[in-house]
Image (cartoon, rainbow, N blue to C red):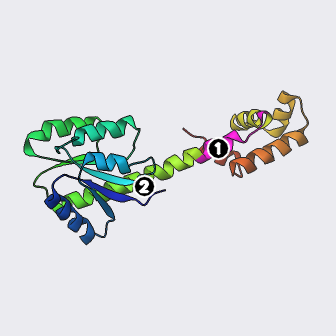
Amino acid sequence: MSTPLAHLVDDDEAIRDALSWLLKSRGLPYATYDSAESFLAAWNKTTSGCLVLDMRMSGMSGLDCFDELCARNSSLPVIFLTGHGDVPLAVATLKKGAFDFFEKPFNDNDLASRIEEAMALDAHQRVANATVDSVKARLATLTTRERQIMGLVLAGKFNKVIADELNISMRTVEVHRSKLFDKMHVKTAVELANLLKP
């Protein structure tokens, strides 16, 4: 996975420099881009951290860049920087899933704090998504019989009842149950149930 960065996208060099200085003073890692196009060219599914995006730029606008990221299923939190006239537009982007917006001129400390919060949210979401992917991968390793037994274990049934329902020996149920728990990396039925909670 790529290093989490605050990705700063603004076509105004003075603003890029000011934001770079601000993030450096907070010890936050960052990268700068002079256009939405250059950021999109560098972006991939592993791009992490957050995006600080100017709403109005020459070439592709911040809004178009945001729409493109949405189309690519990006989960990167986006903070918009807007001029006074763009506030209604910024509010609309919040409804579409942007993390926040700041009207220029903005309070440096408030912006830096929101960038930190956005980066923390992104890190948390990536851990949660990796866990979901890991559980799916483990489920894919189960045999048909192990899946059957898992369903009955999750229904709270004892080994003897499972053996009777599936018309197999209790020892066979124990072996399948043990393999099932090993593959799912759990020790108890409660752990298994918690792992599979939606």
Q: Which residue is mark 2?
A: 123
Q: Which residue is mark 1?
A: 137
Q: Residue at x 69, y 52 (%)?
A: 185
The mark that comes first in sequence, 2 or 1, is 2
Where is residue 36 shown, x and y percent of the image?
27, 46
Q: Residue at x 29, y 40 (%)?
A: 66
Quadrant location of residue 172? top right
Q: Magenta region: which residues?
A: 134-144
Q: Residue at x 26, y 69 (%)?
A: 24
Is 52 left, or right, of 15 in this rendering? Answer: right
Where is residue 46 shown, x and y percent of the image?
45, 51
Q: Quadrant of the C terminus?
A: top right
Q: Secondary structure at mark 2?
A: helix
Marks 2 and 1 sit apart, C-alpha to C-alpha, by 21 Å
Q: Residue at x 19, y 38 (%)?
A: 91
In this orientation, which residue lies closer to the viewer: 148 or 124? 124
Q: Please name the amino acid that badge 2 sits on.
A: Ala
Q: Residues within 10 Å of mark 1 (few under 14, many from 20)?
A: few
> Can the viewer see residue 168?
yes
Magenta run includes residue 141: yes
Q: Is residue 67 above or below residue 19?
A: above
Magenta run includes residue 81: no
Where is residue 76 shown, x and y percent of the image?
37, 47
Q: Secondary structure at mark 1?
A: helix
Q: Is residue 38 above or below residue 116?
A: above
Is 25 left, or right, of 167 in this rendering? Answer: left
Q: Please name the amino acid that badge 1 sits on.
A: Ala
Q: Residues within 10 Å of mark 2 (few under 14, many from 20)?
A: some
